[in-house]
Image: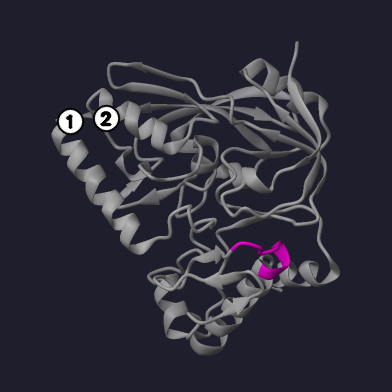
Amino acid sequence: MYIEVKENYDIKNMTSFKIGGRVDKLYFPGTESEFIYLLKTLRYPVILGNWSNVLISSAGIRGSVISTSKMNKIEIEDTTIIAQCGVKGPKLAKAALENGLTGFEFMSGFPGSIGGNIYMNASAHSQSISDFLVKVGVFDLEKKETLIIEKRTLDFAYRSSVLQRKPYILLWAEFDLAKKEKIQIKSFIKKILNFRMTYQPTLSSPNAGSVFKNPEDQSAGRLLDKAGVKNFRVGGARIWDKHANFIVNTGNATSSDVLELMFMMYNAVKEKHHIRLCPEIKYFGEKTPREEDICNIIYNQK
């Protein structure tokens, strides 16, 4: 078995934020069996798909990282789609369109991979990754075995799934979509892409998507806007001028810049609205004492 591996690898340009240091070892499994082999043999690896909803430490990640980017196979039969964990959202949306299937339009222009999308139950424009999900294949890190889990036991909620609470790593997902005229699907995709171009930064302004989750019955963006964060900036990181819940890298931002800016945003909303926002962006890697303090507050709500 040959699995591509890179050592002491600079991963900055692999992330949508264009932020990150070096990784001790970065593995690229190309098949499910290779992925499972790594999950069985590596100790506490970090597993990342399209590196889009994450902030990687500028000091890097000690230990092993697995990238699922090569696990991008899609199978389609009638209305059934089976996708490996590394399939990118836009690729899946395009495949569904080509087969006259609706349900994945929201992932057009969506940078995440299927593994990450199911982990966080990604959603937008009244569609969710869990809407048409039937079942998933996972690897249980504790029992060291593969399991097939039906949708009803995945405990989906807003930006939440059982994968966040149990030692499960997604291998593949099966969906059963609905038929629809391609012209209608294309029209919805066009509407979504126009919305994203207007209200969200493109990857030409490096970012990691929405910074904070929406509190119940609230919009994080509106709360941040009313808290006056639009002019906030730390080093190379600043708030995007068109939407207060996005941070963009102006060219030389570090993970510390972003965390400090997130902390300022968090505190502004807490002081203005008495609401503690919860980050949507996941942090991975080494931490300075200051970064540790910030993460303990905004991630653990201490």
Q: Are marks 2 and 1 in contact (CB under 8 Å)?
A: yes
* Residue at the spot 39% in from the left edge and 31% down from the top edge: 92
Q: Secondary structure at mark 1?
A: helix
Q: Which residues are magenta?
A: 251-257
Looking at the image, residue 33 lies above or below residue 15:
above
Residue 157 on the magenta span: no
Is the residue marked by circle 1 packed among few (<14), some (14-19), or many (20+) residues within 10 Å?
some
Please state the horizontal and vertical placement of residue 97, each as a whole percent of the image.
Answer: 27, 30
Q: Is residue 277 above or below residue 202?
A: below
Give above or below for 297 relative to 108.
below
Cα gap from disc 2 to disc 1, whole angstroms? 6 Å
- Say which residue label 2 marks: 97
| Res. 181 visible in picture | yes
Type of amino acid at the residue the image marks with label 1: Lys
Looking at the image, which residue sits at the far top?
1
Image quadrant for the N terminus? Answer: top right
Q: Nearer the viewer, residue 300 or 12?
A: 12
Which badge, 2 or 1, comes first in the chain's sequence? 2
Residue 133 shows in the view: no
